[in-house]
Amino acid sequence: MEKKVPFFFSILLFIALLFHGGKVLALNCQDGSEEWGYVQVRPKAHMFWWLYKSPYRVEDPSKPWPIVLWLQGGPGASGVGIGNFEEIGPLDRSLKPRNSTWLRKADLLFVDNPVGTGYSFVEDKKLFVKTDDEAATDLTTLLIELFSGDEKLQKSPLFIVAESYGGKFAVTAGLSALKAIEDGKLKLRLGGVALGDSWISPEDFVFSWGPLLKDLSRLDDNGLQKSNSIAERIKQQIEDGKFVEATDSWGELENVIATSSNNVDFYNLLEDAGGDDIAAMELGSYEKLSMEKYSRYLTSMRSRSSSPGGDDDLDKLLNGVIKKKLKIIPENVTWGGQSGDVFNYLAGDFMRPRINEVDELLTKGVNVTVYNGQVDLICSTKGTEAWVHKLKWEGLKIFLAKDRTPLYCGSDKSTTKGFVKSYKNLYFYWILKAGHFVPTDQPCVALDMVGAITQSPAT
């Protein structure tokens, strides 16, 4: 058995790498194409970041080369692991080159956010964040450390691109970053925020589930009635500010949906649960929650997802070859695709809507892009459209009246891949035949989309 380095000595080694401001001395590849490190965002709270510099970079004075900051969902899912190796990074989980990597359009910055996620860690569980705003403050601290002392990074506009619960982090982090920029604490240009299948308004999503599944014959009238009844209860709990109770009811609703639909996949409503490896990682957090009403169901879903090539392989990769490459991960920090602790500590904010924050970004002139996979259920297009209609932004009426433009990939104009519409600084992409994980399900159109969002000079 391999002898573990005691945690105390591991932390001493880690602290020895620290210097002013809490930023860890970053390591990099010899060719300078990658950098990574830790930022101590608060005493004893350490956030891990990994920056890839694009080999496809194009120097164009009129279009600066962009940086995409990718934020994963969960909350507590690892962007360094999942977003990087499963969706948009340079290598897949087999460490083979990914042809559709977003490096073709931008540099990529992955962060394990909030602390306690992936390689990020806390030395005391009391230091876990309990709100999205606390997570945004930590993330802004990291950005200040990375950007404010690096003039090269400052030349590239930063685009925060998020998936799932990461969208809630994106809007709060975007506003936090803007304030830091206005206060002169953060030196960067925020290019925009993109919300992919994002958990912006839980109420609108839970009300969409029953009708969607009923129209697709996945629920009958009885299932629809049960679903809508719990959704009404969730709405009232949210209105009353009882967000923890709303999270409990959300879990109960998922159990009812699963039972009535014979385990529909919440990440692709055309499939049965268990067929999506990435989804299994996020579902892994739910079975750790203290909601006995549906833990048995979620545990069974987890066991169905342990097929070859599943999340166990990613665990081995991140705790093996990648951990050795990075060198600075403390010995007793074990990477996990989804932190149950992070999810539990955020249970009081999980069902809190962030529509007002999206409105604030739009009013401040920030480019906001919303994109959604056609067959996602948990963050359905139906639910996303519902919360977009609730925006108070002055340009909404004209935006809604606009016609959509069809999307294709490459020279093939025979197959519609999606639609897009925009007005001023609001953009909406409908991505066809994609579930919750758009870059994985439709890599070609997703790559074109991120090129458009960032106004990348790459063709």
Image: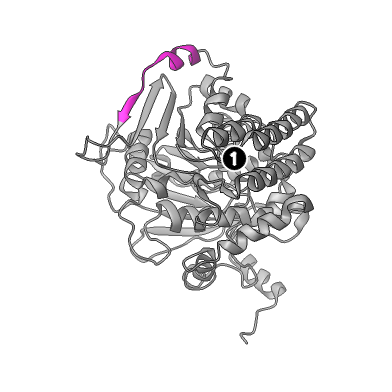
Report the residue at 54% width, 70% height from top.
319
Name above or below for residue 189 compared with residue 86.
Answer: above
| Front-lying residue, 310 or 394 | 310
| Front-lying residue, 248 or 90 | 248
Q: Quadrant of the C terminus?
A: top left
Q: In the displayed image of the protein, which residue is found farthest to the left?
A: 411
Q: Where does the image place residue 428, in percent across and percent down from the top left?
A: 43, 28
Q: Is residue 403 magenta?
A: yes
Q: In the displayed image of the protein, which residue is found farthest to the bottom?
A: 1
- Looking at the image, residue 250 sits to the left or right of residue 65; the answer is right
| Front-lying residue, 38 or 235 | 235
Q: Is residue 80 visible?
A: no
Q: Where does the image place residue 323, in percent across and percent down from the top left?
A: 52, 69
The colour style of the image is one colour
Q: Where does the image place residue 249, in percent across and percent down from the top left?
A: 75, 40
Q: Is residue 454 visible?
A: yes
Name above or below for residue 455 compared with residue 421.
Answer: below
Q: In the displayed image of the protein, which residue is found farthest to the front?
A: 221
Q: Is residue 456 magenta?
A: no
Report the residue at 41% width, 37% height from top.
157
Q: Which quadrant of the view contains residue 52?
A: bottom left
Q: Which quadrant of the view contains residue 405?
A: top left
Q: Residue under circle 1?
A: 169
Q: Where does the image place residue 43, in percent across and percent down from the top left?
A: 71, 54
Mark 1 crowdedness (10 Å alpha carbons): few <14, some 14-19, many ≥20: many
Q: Quadrant of the N terminus?
A: bottom right
Amino acid type, mark 1: Phe
Q: Which region of the structure is painted magenta?
A: 395-406
Q: Which quadrant of the view contains residue 154?
A: top left
- Looking at the image, residue 454 sits to the left or right of residue 278; the answer is left
